[in-house]
Amino acid sequence: MESSKTETMEIIAFGVAARIIGAPRISWPYIRDTAELRAALIHRYPGLRNVPFILAVNRDVSPDEQTIPPGATVAVLPPYSGG
């Protein structure tokens, strides 16, 4: 029996990434790894192509090919400065 429920994950964006995406939080169809997610985000939001950003999966900064568990929260973290 096939489930009709589509799994999603939460994307939390900060700084310029949130401005490009248009919201600080969005629901996104589940993608299995960070490389695929990065490509999908850039495809949907081309402005991200010019912004260096890293991804954090469930609060852990991840390399480009980390597996994303179902139901994860992924943060899009552009460069930031602080004082």
Image: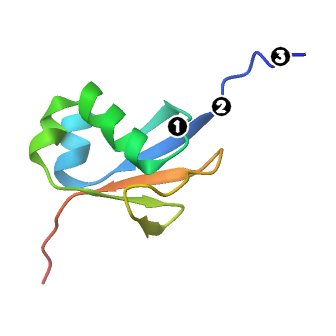
Mark 2 and mark 1: Cα distance apart in space: 9 Å
Q: Which numbered disc, 2 or 3, marks the residue that appears first in the sequence?
A: 3
Task: Point out the image quarter for the N terminus.
Answer: top right
Q: Nearer the viewer, residue 42 or 73?
A: 42
Residue 39 appears in view: yes
Q: In the rendered structure, are the residues bearing label 2 and label 1 in contact, judged by CB atoms less than 8 Å apart? A: no
Kind of residue sitting beneath label 2: Glu
> Does label 2 or label 1 sit earlier along the sequence?
2
> What's the residue at 28%, 54% (across, down)?
14
Helix, strand, or loop for circle 1? loop
Would you name the residue on which mark 2 appears?
Answer: 7
Q: Position of residue 65 (x, y in %)?
A: 43, 55
How many tags in the picture? 3
Task: Depth check: give the residue in front, 38 or 19.
Answer: 38
Image disc number at residue 31 = 1
- Outermost residue, bottom direction? 83
Q: Residues within 10 Å of mark 1 (few under 14, many from 20)?
A: some
The image shows residue 9 at horizontal and vertical percentages of 56, 40
- Residue 59 screen position, x and y as percent: 49, 67
In the image, which disc is placed on residue 40?
none
Between the C-alphas of marks 1 and 3, the distance is 19 Å
